[in-house]
Image (cartoon, helix red, strand yellow):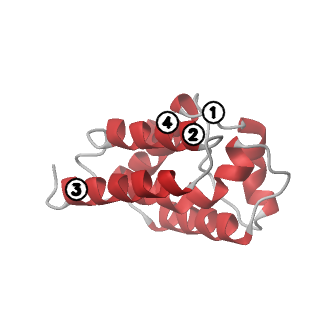
């Protein structure tokens, strides 16, 4: 693993666990699932410069919209989604594949509403070729 990956992952998980304590009981299972997902992905991206924890952190503000039934995406959600789209556009193939794998695994392992995920580019006013989709072929990005 790259230097710092364990520290970043540990710091992210500690932050998420502390944040969980402050939240109501209704959303704790969602954050717990997100924490487990982040731990499982630490090994997926060992050869890439892109950290999946960073990708998920950028999408963290979208949780209410993508997973909890909110009717609209927030400004913070759109900003994070735009950041991921720009990073994807500006990256070389290994990093694009890593971003794709991270989003694909999120779609597989988290209760994301895929229809809402597909609406993010339109709602947040950006274009991208990457999708949050469990069936995407990340070798073709």
| Residue 136 image-quadrant placement | top right
Q: In this view, does 33 lie to the left or right of 51?
A: right
Would you say the residues marked 3 and 4 are in contact, meaning their CB atoms lie under 8 Å apart?
no
| Residue 128 image-quadrant placement | bottom right
Q: Distance between the residues labelled 4 and 1?
A: 9 Å
Marker disc for residue 33:
4
Q: Earlier in the sequence, mark 4 or mark 1?
A: 4
Which residue occupies 57% across, 39% down? 30
Q: Which of marks 2 and 3 is nearer the N terminus?
A: 3
Is residue 140 at all visible to an observer of this figure? no
Would you say the residues marked 1 and 2 are in contact, meaning their CB atoms lie under 8 Å apart?
yes
Mark whose residue sits in front, 3 or 4: 4
Marker disc for residue 111:
1
- Out of 91 and 59, give the one closest to the viewer: 59
Q: Distance between the residues labelled 1 and 3?
A: 26 Å
Q: In this view, does 77 lie to the left or right of 136?
A: right
Residue with the mark numbered 3: 5
Q: How crowded is mark 4: few (under 14 residues within 10 Å), some or many (20 or more)?
A: some
Mark whose residue sits in front, 1 or 2: 2
Q: Where in the figure is residue 64, as x and y percent of width and height?
A: 70, 51
| Label 3: element kind | helix
Would you say the residues marked 4 and 1 are in contact, meaning their CB atoms lie under 8 Å apart?
yes
- Out of 3 and 7, give the one closest to the viewer: 7
| Label 1: element kind | loop
Residue with the mark numbered 2: 30
Q: Distance between the residues labelled 2 and 3?
A: 23 Å
Which residue occupies 56% across, 34% down? 110
């Amino acid at each position: 693993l790259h230097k710092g990956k364990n520290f970043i992952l540990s710091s992210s998980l500690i932050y998420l666990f502390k944040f969980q304590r402050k939240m109501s009981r209704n959303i704790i299972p969602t954050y717990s699932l997100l924490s487990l997902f982040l731990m499982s992905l630490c090994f997926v991206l060992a050869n890439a410069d892109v950290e999946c924890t960073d990708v998920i952190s950028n999408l963290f503000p979208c949780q209410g919209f993508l997973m909890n039934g909110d009717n609209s995406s927030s400004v913070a959600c759109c900003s994070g989604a735009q950041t991921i789209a720009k990073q994807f556009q500006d990256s070389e193939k290994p990093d694009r594949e890593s971003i794709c794998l991270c989003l694909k695994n999120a779609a597989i392992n988290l209760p994301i509403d895929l229809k809402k995920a597909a609406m993010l580019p339109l709602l947040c006013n950006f274009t991208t070729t990457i999708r949050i989709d469990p069936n995407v072929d990340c070798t073709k990005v």
